[in-house]
Image (spheres, grey):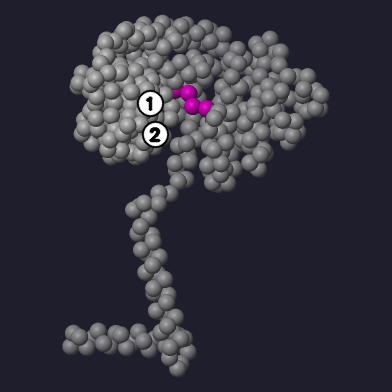
Amino acid sequence: MSETTRPAEQTSTAATIEGALRDCTVGGRGRKRIRKGDIAVIDSADLTSREAQTLIDAEPVAVVNMSRFTTGTVPNYGPLMLLREGIPLFDNAGPGVTDGFRDGAKKGSVVVDGTLHNGVKVIGKAEPFSQEAAEAGFTEAQRSFLGRMESNLSDAVEFMHSESPLLVDGLGIPDVEDEIRGRKVLVVSPGPEHRRQVDDLRNFIREYDPVLIGVESSADTLLDLGYRPDFVIGNPVNIAAETLRSGARVILPADPEGHATGLERIQELGVGAMTFPAATDSPTDLALLMANYHEAEIIVAAGTRVDLDGMFHDQKNATPAALLTRAKVGPKLVDADVIVTLYTVSSGRGTAWLWALLGVLVALAAIILVVGLGGDESFTDNLIDTWNGIALTVQGWFN
């Protein structure tokens, strides 16, 4: 998708907007510290209305975006909201701008031509983003968005037509007997976060011993982390020989006629394999459909996150087939990070009472040891004598 074409803009190099520089990027300290009159530096492509409202509430004197306010992918209202509040906008400053200042730098400024300063030092060059540019970008993005959605809906209808036997009755799904029925299943796909997610799921895996399905190269990750996958799905050319020989049941995606790419490699390694004929070319979709068809209790997906927002933003993996697959799996499907959250204990005030209780127990244990070992009699007799003495003393207070 090409970026929005901006109309020519009149700028004056004389006017300068001054204020403290605030790092309002994800993870930046300025997100919570920004105050009225600051210059907010963000990194938000296609700024949403919610992000814009947060900035409006903070009343910055200007907003500098390291990314594009509008890429032309989705018709987003955020920039228009800021401009209607009279907040000057500058975008496309590029990565690394936040390296040029410490959050809260008092001598920040941005010239109306987009030059960003920390004191006298130039730390970046952005582009002025006018009301006209925002409106033109919104109109272009809306036109592109609607065209893309119409195309996706057409593809979805075509996929339903070709794959209705698979989606409705599970036609073509390999028979794996009762290996999945009633169990939790973890499907790992080769996304950018899959290794971290599997590592974070170690307590879940230890507790429930889920069926492990490795999709293509992510099956190698499972083996590398000490887990033997129960199933491996994908083109074997993209999977290590050690993983294919690990004892996992290998499933090869095949076209509707049954031809599977990479069959020669399986034959060379002497590994048995089953084929899974389908029109979709996504082994992750096949893994999810197989787990659902064989009555998995829940299906945890790591390394892949597909939702409607992904389709809106034209993400590569957010295809109509992927969305229909997830609609078929329905309430059984859970993102890996949701499970990780359940196994994450907050270190804040929620556990403070546990530490307080532990301190009381330690103090009581110390008192018992001192009292029990401090007399001339046995440990137990010393404790009894001490307790009786305390009781008599308390009784005397009330007599």
| 127 and 184: which is toward the camera | 127
User: At which x and y percent is residue 58?
Assistant: 23, 32
Residue 322 visible from this viewpoint: no
> Where 381 sits versus 261, above or below?
below
Question: What's the residue at 54%, 38% (across, down)?
Answer: 196
Q: Is residue 354 magenta?
A: no
Question: Label 2: few (<14), some or many (≥20) within 10 Å?
Answer: some
Badge 1 marks a residue whose secondary structure is strand
**Which residue is disc 2 drawn over?**
100
Please report contact status of discs 1 and 2: CB closer than 8 Å, yes or no: yes
Residue that carries the numbered disc 1 in the rendered image: 124
Q: Residue 243, image x and y in percent?
A: 71, 33
- Classify mark 1: residues with Cα within 10 Å, few (<14), some (14-19) or many (20+): many
Q: What amino acid is found at the position of numbered circle 1 in the picture? A: Gly
- Say which of 291 and 188 sits in front: 188
**Relative horizontal placement of residue 166, taking residue 374 as reference (left or right):** right
Q: Earlier in the sequence, mark 1 or mark 2?
A: 2
Q: Quadrant of residue 97?
A: top left
The quarter of the rendered structure image containing the C terminus is bottom left
Which residue: 41% across, 34% down? 99
Marks 1/2: CA–CA distance: 8 Å
Q: Which residues are magenta?
A: 303-307
